[in-house]
């Protein structure tokens, strides 16, 4: 790589490593003092990863800022909780049952995992699939669905729990049509973000 | 290697990399470079041990040898084998390569031709033949690749686990990772053929006419770049030619003699 012009920031712009929890990736980010943005994982896993990353970064003499550990979440905002669920769940279900399912050569292309991690993940494969249950899934993962008030409160709670101030919200999921994505984005921008800014 | 194998196993450190070498027989050295997967084993090579000192090293990142993630180019393997041959006190040799190992053998022969007395390439990888592309094995699920390797699947079955076996899958994944380091970003080196004319020793190119991994049409492409090469097309064989048609070993022995 020969980036030109050179980045303005010294020593470099903010960098994030995206990971799915492999200890090797965490070690890599920690050693360089980079941020770590985990892919969509259960809340419990995300908490452990952040904890681990802070420990390992400290080991290398880095103190991670809150913004270096973004919170990745799914959101859907509507006029009422019931309407939000009615409009959203069908797409979320499609995501879990079909979109998140893949064959091994795409999930773990050669070199993406150590062989140790490959064995661990193969043993736990397919646990995400089958028996879609919105209540269970939305409490296990960071998924906020409802009125602006409810979504803002939920994200606020999560950022406090994860000690972060960097929110990465996924607005569109699976086969959601254009109008819902636009509606969701608009309500998120106009109703949720101001609430989060107020704290 | 089965318990009945004539091969003896030797573990060496080559420039810091654990390198396992199996060898059998006495006489002039015949070195076999295996392909990108080692699930098939090397028992077929025993037949040549009656006449030669057959040497089958595991490449770094494959089979019983150790890993070296800094190997990112086929030339790193050429250098590895220069080191190994020094350790084994091999000066001149007969060299045979299967698939990816064929590419490596052809590389070695084009750079160190004075050391290679005869060269056998079995369905070698390495040329770009746009009308007959090689299978994209990185994008093809392993369970689909394996049955494509041979026309007589029963011949390969004893080498495969009966049901999904995580250690077997992990071993293949590790070898695919090593392969990907070499060939994912740059599957083909366009400069490779321009040096192939330096392969002046007697050369034999063996191909199964039903090869599903690298189509048999590649044989003529190789012949074009190595004009004095003999081409042997084996009817009814796929990529692992000798597994489908074990009698090919006799024809190869005659060529090597």
Image (cartoon, coloured by chain):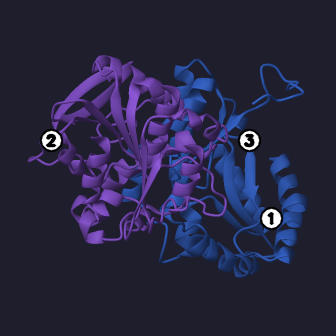
Chain colours: A blue, B purple
Position of residue B66 relative to residue A80, above or below, is: above
Q: Are marks 3 and 2 on the same chain?
A: no
Q: Chain of mark 1?
A: A
Please state the horizontal and vertical placement of residue B127, each as a whole percent of the image.
59, 49
Element on which disc 1 rests: helix
Comparing A45 with B257, the one in front is B257
Taking the spot 58% from the left edge, 66% from the top edge, the residue there is: A100
Measured in 3D between alpha carbons, the distance from the residue under mark 2 to the one under mark 1, in whole angstroms, is: 81 Å
| B254 lies left or right of B231 | left
- Can residue B164 be seen in the rendering of this structure? no
Name the quarter where the N terminus of chain A is drawn: top right
The residue pinned by badge 2 equals: B50
Element on which disc 3 rests: loop
Instruction: Return the disc, 1 or 3, that comes first in the chain's sequence.
Output: 1
Q: Chain of mark 3?
A: A
Foreground label between 3 and 2: 2
The residue pinned by badge 3 equals: A165
Measured in 3D between alpha carbons, the distance from the residue under mark 3 to the one under mark 2, in whole angstroms, is: 72 Å
The residue pinned by badge 1 equals: A148
| B225 lies left or right of B201 | right
Comparing B156 with B138, the one in front is B156
Please state the horizontal and vertical placement of residue B151, each as a whole percent of the image.
35, 70
| B55 lies left or right of A19 | left
Please state the horizontal and vertical placement of residue B254, each as a whole percent of the image.
27, 48
Foreground label between 2 and 1: 2
Please state the horizontal and vertical placement of residue A117, each as a whole percent of the image.
42, 46
Foreground label between 1 and 3: 3
Q: Are marks 2 and 1 on the same chain?
A: no
Check if mark 1's residue and mark 3's residue have beta carbons within 8 Å: no
Check if mark 3's residue and mark 2's residue have beta carbons within 8 Å: no
* Badge 2 density bin: few <14, some 14–19, many ≥20, Cα 10 Å: few
Element on which disc 2 rests: helix
């Amino acid at each position: 790589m020969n980036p030109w012009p050179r980045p303005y920031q010294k020593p470099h712009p903010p960098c994030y490593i995206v990971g799915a929890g492999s200890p090797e990736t965490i070690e890599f980010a920690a050693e360089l003092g980079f941020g770590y943005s985990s892919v969509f994982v259960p809340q419990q896993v995300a908490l452990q990863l952040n904890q681990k990353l802070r420990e390992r970064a400290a080991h290398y003499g880095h103190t991670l800022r809150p913004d270096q550990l973004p919170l990745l979440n799914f959101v859907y905002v509507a006029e009422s909780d019931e309407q939000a669920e009615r409009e959203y769940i069908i797409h979320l279900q499609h995501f879990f049952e079909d979109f998140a399912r893949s064959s091994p050569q795409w999930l773990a292309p050669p070199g993406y995992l150590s062989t140790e991690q490959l064995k661990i993940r193969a043993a736990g494969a397919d646990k995400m699939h089958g028996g879609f249950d919105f209540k269970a899934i939305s409490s296990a993962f960071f998924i906020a669905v409802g009125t602006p008030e409810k979504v803002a409160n939920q994200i606020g709670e999560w950022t406090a729990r994860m000690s972060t101030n960097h929110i990465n919200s996924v607005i569109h999921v699976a086969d959601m049509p254009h109008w819902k994505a636009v509606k969701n984005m608009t309500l998120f921008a106009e109703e949720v973000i101001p609430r989060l800014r107020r704290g | 290697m089965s318990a009945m194998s004539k091969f003896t196993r030797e573990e060496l450190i080559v420039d810091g990399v654990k390198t396992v070498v199996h060898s059998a027989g006495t006489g002039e050295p015949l070195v076999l470079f295996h392909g990108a997967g080692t699930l098939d084993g090397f028992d077929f090579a025993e037949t040549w041990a009656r006449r030669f000192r057959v040497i089958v090293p595991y490449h770094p990142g494959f089979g019983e040898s150790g890993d070296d993630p800094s190997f990112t180019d086929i030339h790193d393997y050429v250098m590895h084998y220069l080191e190994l041959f020094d350790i084994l006190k091999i000066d001149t040799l007969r060299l045979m390569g299967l698939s990816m190992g064929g590419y490596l053998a052809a590389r070695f022969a084009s750079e160190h031709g004075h050391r290679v007395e005869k060269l056998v390439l079995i369905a070698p990888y390495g040329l770009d033949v746009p009308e007959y592309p090689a299978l994209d094995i990185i994008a093809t699920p392993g369970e689909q690749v394996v049955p494509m390797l041979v026309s007589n699947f029963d011949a390969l079955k004893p080498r495969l686990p009966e049901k999904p076996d995580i250690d077997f899958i992990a071993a293949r994944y590790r070898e695919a990772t090593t392969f990907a380091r070499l060939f994912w970003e740059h599957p083909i080196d366009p400069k490779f053929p321009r040096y192939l004319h330096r392969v002046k020793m007697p050369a034999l190119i063996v191909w199964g006419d039903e090869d599903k991994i690298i189509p048999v049409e590649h044989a003529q492409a190789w012949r074009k770049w190595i004009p004095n090469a003999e081409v042997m097309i084996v009817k009814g064989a796929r990529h692992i030619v000798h597994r489908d048609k074990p009698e090919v070993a006799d024809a190869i022995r005659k060529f090597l003699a």
